[in-house]
Amino acid sequence: MSVRPATLSGPRTPARGPAGATAIVAALAGAGTRVLFGVPGGGPNLDVVGAAGAAGLRFVLTHTETAAAIMAATSADLTGTPGAVLVTRGPGLASAVNGIAHAALDRLPLVVIADTVRAAEAGRVSHQRLDQAALGGQVAKAVLMIGGDRAGQTAAHAVRRALAAPPGPVIALMDDEAPAAGPAKDPDGEHPDAEGLDGEGPGTEGPDAEGRAQASDLGPLATALGQARRPVLLLGTQAVAHTAAIRAAVAGRGIPALHTYRARGIVPDTAAEAGGLVTGGTMEWPLLAQADLIVGLGVDEAEMIPAAWDYPAPTVLVSEWPAQRPGMERGGMARPGMARTGTASYFTGATTLTAPLPAAIDLVAAWIPATGPRWAPGAGRAARAGPDLMVCIC
């Protein structure tokens, strides 16, 4: 145990080992994280950099905290593992908020490691001091204090919260001298006590029992498909993980598919079924205006631009986590416990289903057109040729 240098007020007490730094790095490494981005200050920040090096994590120094957060979020998007960003307290964390908000809106797992004013000095230190729990709580799923005897448990909880559906950012405030580590602000998660962190709990590993996806919830989709002659698929970010199954389901079937910007490429642009992008704008109008059923697979409302959703065809949206509702969100994150079926807030009049996407894809693959006018061959490609081109129906 090291001894801190003496000060004008007398010798400092012996310093504790950086339990929080070791714990958060171990939790990230265990989840597959291999790179840490950031703009560190001193103290606990340097402990984290040292622990990262010892654990084999590469540290990338960036010009700004916002750049670090966006780079870490992009790493999460590309690898599927938690992104990690390191910032100093106060203005450092505030400077990262833009990147944290990006991770929240794009549903990317991000762990933001920040220094903080130590609990023992909170009554007298004002330098770089902000209410970081209040600041971070506006854009993050949770703000947790990590350090002390339960550092390992709380760090593991932070990483699980970032990965839990829907994924998003969690802020980890580092203080090995905190009297009790735990949630500084975590409105939807369990308290990270010794028992709760060893098992699943509400908001920790995913939606709670009321919101978990069940294949039996797909009855409305099966009924709608049974009556459809001209369905259109909307493919969103959750569908990316099921690319192979979707391609097999639509190949040669004549079902046009539109992609959100984050899902583009699930159905290759060269395929006859690829109808281009769906944004909430006008480019998708030729297909959607003539469809008799619109099926969304893994579409997140945050992917759409503000616009009216006024297509005449019924819309059925399938997601693996509950849809958002106005007044029931924090930091852009859907809260657990929402109903498995209901009406979407952005997609006016749509039916929303929380169910496994593979089961929904199987229903699409088994679709047999009802009697009546159907899509012409290559309707998706024809719609992509230009917004003024009407899609021929035969």
Image (cartoon, rainbow, N blue to C red):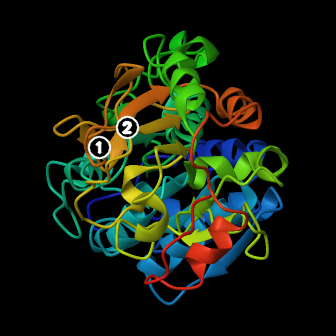
Q: Position of residue 105 (x, y in %)?
A: 40, 58
Q: Quadrant of residue 184?
A: top left
Dot 2: what SS? loop
Going by the numbered disc 2, the residue's amino acid type is Ala
Going by the numbered disc 1, the residue's amino acid type is Ala
Left or right of 385: which side holds 340? Answer: left
Q: Which mark is residue 178?
A: 2
The residue singled out by tag 1 in the image is 119
376 relative to 109, above or below:
below
Left or right of 138: which side holds 196? Answer: right
Q: Position of residue 133 (x, y in %)?
A: 26, 47
Q: Quadrant of the C terminus?
A: bottom right
Dot 1: what SS? helix
Q: Is residue 232 visible?
A: yes
Depth check: give the residue in front, 251 or 130. Answer: 251
Name the residue at 49% across, 52% down. Answer: 107
Say few, some or many: other residues with alpha carbon within 10 Å of mark 2 (under 14 / 14 to 19 / 20 or more): some
Q: Is residue 115 visible?
A: no
Name the residue at 77% across, 63% down. Answer: 57
Between marks 1 and 2, how big is the CA–CA gap?
5 Å
Depth check: give the residue in front, 336 or 247. Answer: 247
Residues at marks 1 and 2 touching, judged by CB atoms closer than 8 Å: yes
136 relative to 317, above or below:
below
| Farthest-out residue, bottom | 63
Counting residues from the N terminus, which is met first, the one under dot 1 or under dot 2?
1
Name the residue at 74% across, 59% down. Answer: 79
Q: Position of residue 152 (x, y in %)?
A: 61, 32
